[in-house]
Image (cartoon, grey):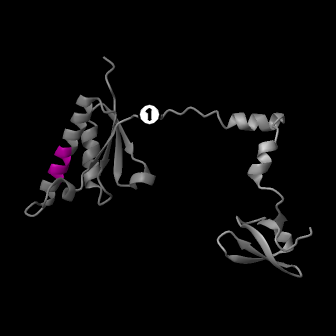
Amino acid sequence: MCLEIGNKVAVIDANVRGFVTKINKDEVFVKDDSGMEYRFFKEELVKIEQDQNELSKFSDINNSMLKEKTQGTQKRKKTIFTKDRNEVVMEVDLHAEKLVKSTRGMDNYDILSLQISVAKQKIEYCISKKISKLVLIHGVGDGVLKTELYYLLNNYSVNYYDASYQKYGQGATEVYVFQNPN
Protein backbone atom coordinates (compact mmCIF):
# COMPACT_ATOMS: atom_id res chain seq x y z
CA MET A 1 0.00 0.00 0.00
CA CYS A 2 1.34 3.37 -0.98
CA LEU A 3 0.77 6.01 1.68
CA GLU A 4 1.46 9.68 1.19
CA ILE A 5 1.39 12.67 3.49
CA GLY A 6 -2.18 13.97 3.73
CA ASN A 7 -3.88 10.60 3.15
CA LYS A 8 -6.80 9.76 5.40
CA VAL A 9 -6.14 6.50 7.26
CA ALA A 10 -7.66 4.26 9.92
CA VAL A 11 -5.89 1.91 12.30
CA ILE A 12 -6.83 -1.76 11.91
CA ASP A 13 -6.90 -2.79 15.59
CA ALA A 14 -7.87 0.52 17.19
CA ASN A 15 -10.52 3.17 16.86
CA VAL A 16 -8.15 5.82 15.53
CA ARG A 17 -8.62 7.77 12.32
CA GLY A 18 -6.67 10.67 11.03
CA PHE A 19 -4.34 12.09 8.42
CA VAL A 20 -0.76 11.07 7.65
CA THR A 21 1.61 13.82 8.75
CA LYS A 22 5.00 12.15 8.40
CA ILE A 23 6.47 8.94 6.92
CA ASN A 24 9.76 7.54 8.16
CA LYS A 25 10.63 4.19 6.46
CA ASP A 26 8.09 1.73 7.96
CA GLU A 27 6.77 4.18 10.54
CA VAL A 28 3.84 6.44 9.79
CA PHE A 29 2.76 9.35 11.97
CA VAL A 30 -1.00 9.95 12.10
CA LYS A 31 -2.72 13.02 13.54
CA ASP A 32 -6.35 12.53 14.59
CA ASP A 33 -9.15 15.13 14.69
CA SER A 34 -8.33 16.16 18.27
CA GLY A 35 -4.74 16.98 17.30
CA MET A 36 -3.11 13.97 18.98
CA GLU A 37 -0.29 12.42 16.95
CA TYR A 38 0.32 8.66 16.92
CA ARG A 39 3.06 6.45 15.48
CA PHE A 40 2.14 3.23 13.65
CA PHE A 41 3.74 0.75 11.28
CA LYS A 42 2.47 0.76 7.69
CA GLU A 43 0.97 -2.71 8.16
CA GLU A 44 -1.32 -1.39 10.91
CA LEU A 45 -2.98 1.23 8.71
CA VAL A 46 -5.65 1.22 6.05
CA LYS A 47 -6.06 4.03 3.55
CA ILE A 48 -9.58 5.45 3.50
CA GLU A 49 -10.77 6.73 0.16
CA GLN A 50 -14.29 7.61 1.30
CA ASP A 51 -16.09 7.56 4.63
CA GLN A 52 -18.16 4.47 5.38
CA ASN A 53 -21.40 6.44 5.58
CA GLU A 54 -20.70 7.83 2.11
CA LEU A 55 -20.21 4.29 0.78
CA SER A 56 -23.37 2.98 2.41
CA LYS A 57 -25.47 5.53 0.51
CA PHE A 58 -24.69 3.72 -2.71
CA SER A 59 -24.83 0.14 -1.49
CA ASP A 60 -27.60 -2.10 -2.76
CA ILE A 61 -28.58 -4.93 -0.47
CA ASN A 62 -29.60 -7.79 -2.72
CA ASN A 63 -27.63 -10.43 -0.91
CA SER A 64 -30.07 -12.90 0.70
CA MET A 65 -27.79 -13.51 3.68
CA LEU A 66 -27.53 -9.79 4.43
CA LYS A 67 -31.30 -9.36 4.11
CA GLU A 68 -31.83 -12.24 6.51
CA LYS A 69 -29.43 -10.73 9.05
CA THR A 70 -31.00 -7.27 8.86
CA GLN A 71 -34.49 -8.72 9.24
CA GLY A 72 -33.30 -11.00 12.04
CA THR A 73 -32.27 -8.03 14.17
CA GLN A 74 -35.83 -6.74 14.15
CA LYS A 75 -37.24 -9.94 15.62
CA ARG A 76 -37.13 -10.06 19.39
CA LYS A 77 -37.39 -13.07 21.53
CA LYS A 78 -40.44 -12.99 23.76
CA THR A 79 -39.73 -13.31 27.43
CA ILE A 80 -41.87 -13.95 30.44
CA PHE A 81 -40.84 -10.68 32.03
CA THR A 82 -42.01 -7.76 29.93
CA LYS A 83 -41.70 -4.21 31.06
CA ASP A 84 -44.42 -1.84 30.08
CA ARG A 85 -43.18 1.67 29.38
CA ASN A 86 -46.00 3.17 31.41
CA GLU A 87 -45.60 0.68 34.23
CA VAL A 88 -45.59 2.24 37.68
CA VAL A 89 -42.86 0.97 39.98
CA MET A 90 -42.87 2.17 43.56
CA GLU A 91 -39.51 2.37 45.32
CA VAL A 92 -39.38 2.44 49.10
CA ASP A 93 -36.12 3.00 50.96
CA LEU A 94 -36.40 1.28 54.34
CA HIS A 95 -33.20 2.67 55.83
CA ALA A 96 -34.02 4.13 59.25
CA GLU A 97 -32.51 7.55 58.49
CA LYS A 98 -34.88 7.87 55.52
CA LEU A 99 -37.96 7.05 57.60
CA VAL A 100 -37.48 9.28 60.65
CA LYS A 101 -35.58 12.48 61.34
CA SER A 102 -33.56 10.98 64.16
CA THR A 103 -33.11 7.49 65.55
CA ARG A 104 -32.00 8.88 68.91
CA GLY A 105 -33.61 6.91 71.72
CA MET A 106 -34.59 4.02 69.45
CA ASP A 107 -33.06 0.60 69.87
CA ASN A 108 -32.67 -2.00 67.11
CA TYR A 109 -36.07 -3.58 67.83
CA ASP A 110 -37.85 -0.21 67.50
CA ILE A 111 -36.10 0.52 64.21
CA LEU A 112 -36.90 -2.93 62.82
CA SER A 113 -40.56 -2.61 63.88
CA LEU A 114 -40.79 0.77 62.16
CA GLN A 115 -39.24 -0.59 58.96
CA ILE A 116 -41.59 -3.60 58.87
CA SER A 117 -44.68 -1.44 59.52
CA VAL A 118 -43.69 0.96 56.71
CA ALA A 119 -43.14 -1.99 54.37
CA LYS A 120 -46.55 -3.41 55.32
CA GLN A 121 -48.24 -0.04 54.66
CA LYS A 122 -46.58 0.25 51.25
CA ILE A 123 -47.54 -3.31 50.23
CA GLU A 124 -51.16 -2.69 51.20
CA TYR A 125 -51.09 0.65 49.38
CA CYS A 126 -49.83 -1.06 46.20
CA ILE A 127 -52.56 -3.68 46.47
CA SER A 128 -55.29 -1.06 46.95
CA LYS A 129 -54.03 1.22 44.13
CA LYS A 130 -53.29 -1.71 41.76
CA ILE A 131 -49.57 -0.91 41.51
CA SER A 132 -47.98 -4.11 40.24
CA LYS A 133 -44.33 -3.59 41.20
CA LEU A 134 -42.76 -2.48 44.43
CA VAL A 135 -39.04 -2.28 45.19
CA LEU A 136 -38.12 -2.46 48.86
CA ILE A 137 -34.60 -1.15 49.46
CA HIS A 138 -33.38 -2.77 52.66
CA GLY A 139 -29.60 -2.67 52.33
CA VAL A 140 -27.15 -5.52 52.80
CA GLY A 141 -26.29 -5.51 56.52
CA ASP A 142 -26.72 -8.69 58.57
CA GLY A 143 -29.87 -9.72 56.70
CA VAL A 144 -32.29 -9.36 59.63
CA LEU A 145 -34.55 -6.88 57.84
CA LYS A 146 -34.48 -8.92 54.64
CA THR A 147 -35.50 -12.07 56.54
CA GLU A 148 -38.34 -10.23 58.27
CA LEU A 149 -39.50 -8.76 54.95
CA TYR A 150 -39.61 -12.22 53.37
CA TYR A 151 -41.65 -13.46 56.34
CA LEU A 152 -44.06 -10.52 55.88
CA LEU A 153 -44.31 -11.00 52.10
CA ASN A 154 -45.32 -14.65 52.55
CA ASN A 155 -48.61 -13.37 54.08
CA TYR A 156 -49.63 -11.64 50.82
CA SER A 157 -50.41 -12.91 47.32
CA VAL A 158 -47.18 -11.59 45.85
CA ASN A 159 -44.03 -12.89 44.23
CA TYR A 160 -40.72 -11.49 45.44
CA TYR A 161 -37.15 -11.82 44.28
CA ASP A 162 -33.88 -9.92 44.38
CA ALA A 163 -34.16 -6.63 42.51
CA SER A 164 -31.87 -5.65 39.66
CA TYR A 165 -28.29 -5.99 40.85
CA GLN A 166 -27.18 -3.44 38.26
CA LYS A 167 -29.52 -0.79 39.63
CA TYR A 168 -29.77 -1.58 43.37
CA GLY A 169 -26.91 -3.92 44.20
CA GLN A 170 -27.65 -6.73 46.65
CA GLY A 171 -29.71 -4.64 49.03
CA ALA A 172 -33.16 -4.59 47.43
CA THR A 173 -36.13 -6.89 46.87
CA GLU A 174 -38.60 -6.51 44.01
CA VAL A 175 -42.18 -7.44 44.79
CA TYR A 176 -44.70 -8.31 42.09
CA VAL A 177 -48.27 -7.76 43.32
CA PHE A 178 -50.87 -9.98 41.67
CA GLN A 179 -53.83 -7.96 40.49
CA ASN A 180 -57.35 -9.29 40.70
CA PRO A 181 -58.89 -9.01 37.20
CA ASN A 182 -62.43 -8.46 38.64
Residue at the left extreme? Answer: 105
As displayed, is residue 70 above or below residue 108?
above
The image quarter containing residue 96 is bottom left
Give the left or right position of residue 79, taking residue 178 as reference: right
Inspect the image, locate mark 1, and give the three-letter code of the amino acid beneath it.
Asp
As displayed, is residue 55 above or below residue 160?
below
Residue found 82% across the figure and 61% down from its top: 48
Q: How many marks?
A: 1
Q: Quadrant of the C terminus?
A: top left
Circle 1: element type: loop
Instruction: Tell me residue 152's x, y (percent).
Output: 24, 41
- Range drawn in magenta: 112-118
Instruction: Tell me residue 16's x, y (percent).
Output: 71, 67
Q: In this rendered view, identify the residue nearer to me: 6 or 62.
A: 6
Instruction: Name the main secondary structure of what is drawn in magenta.
Output: helix
Residue that mark 1 sits on? 84
Q: In this rendered view, identify the residue nearer to me: 101 or 56.
A: 56
Using a 10 Å C-alpha cutoff, classify the residue at mark 1 as few (fewer than 14 neighbours), some (14 to 19) or many (20 or more). Answer: few
Q: In this rendered view, identify the residue nearer to me: 86 or 105.
A: 86
As displayed, is residue 104 above or below residue 55?
below
Q: Quadrant of the N terminus?
A: bottom right
Residue found 15% across the figure and 59% down from its top: 108
